Amino acid sequence: MNNFFPIIISIISIFFFNVGSYAADNSSNNSITLKLPPKSLAQWYKPENKRQVWLHTMFRLRREMLAMQDYSADKQDKELQKWSQKFIKDYQSISDMVPQWQEYLKLEHLKTLETAVNKQQYTSIAPILKKLGKTCMNCHDDYKTITTLLYRTADFSLQKVQLKSHSYDYDEVMEHLSSTVNRINIAIKDGYFSKAQQIIPSLENQLSGLSENCSECHKKDTIPVERIMEASKQLLPELAEKLELKDKKQAGRKLGEFAVKVCARCHAVHKLTSDLKQELQ
């Protein structure tokens, strides 16, 4: 449980605490207005593009700026020339990819940088990079968090989950899981321990079907799915033991632990961001 709440808090803070930097608060109706990125940006992200072109361009720009900063400090002209040319190319490509963001670019600083590099004016490089960095942050302040939500969070709306012989929408599967867990909870509270035990296999089957679907996206990093399924395999037998003993208090606690370590862990990562994404589309 101690690992779970920081995850929730971090996700909420990423969205809501950053909102202030690009959202206008309307105090009359307690609403906010968010700046959505231009639709032309979508073509540089998956699934419209085979690669995360925009994302990797941003990574390159950060790396190129750091290389220029270090090589100018060390007065290593050959390396400085190489990295400055890479940076100029990538910086200029922003307006080609998303013309609507050309206003954020300061091409005059780019010219000044090029001149300083060619003339080996090493002490001038860092101040120029700082000015160029501010142009990046201006765009980031307006769009970075929203862009992350739109293009780098999971979209479950088109996904299907196979349970036994039937294919369900993701929302349907979540509803089934919620109902199953709550039926166990109700049975525990009312003292129907045998009934609660009988429901556990259904919950195990639903989780197994869901985990197979999760593995489609977690092909390279299976640890999150494995961790959740291992928690389930440990906690459900422990829950069955408490039910066998007809220990209402301990059974309730064990079911609560299951809800936090299995259900809530996934919700903390995916549900909040997925719901926000749907609201923004």
Image: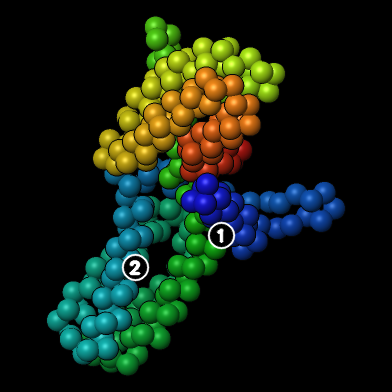
- Tell me which amino acid carries mark 2: Arg
Sequence-first disc among 1 and 2: 2
Q: Position of residue 127 (x, y in %)?
A: 40, 86
Which residue lies at the image location 61% right of the left edge and 38% below the top edge? 279
17 left or right of 52?
Answer: right
Q: Residue furthest right?
A: 28
Quarter of the image for residue 132 reads bottom left
41 left or right of 216?
Answer: right
Determine the CA span between mark 1 and mark 2: 18 Å
- Tell me which amino acid carries mark 1: Asp
Disc 2 designates what residue? 62
Disc 1 designates what residue? 142
- Mark 2 burial class by Cα count in 10 Å: few <14, some 14-19, many 20+: some
Q: Residue furthest top?
A: 165
Q: Position of residue 4 (x, y in %)?
A: 51, 48
45 left or right of 169?
Answer: left
Q: Is residue 220 above or below residue 194?
A: below
Q: Position of residue 17 (x, y in %)?
A: 62, 59
- Say what secondary structure mark 1 lies in: helix
Which residue lies at the image location 47% right of the left edge and 14% below the top edge? 202
Pick the quarter of the image with the C terminus.
top right
Q: Residue furthest front?
A: 245
**Count of all numbered marks drawn on residues in the image:** 2
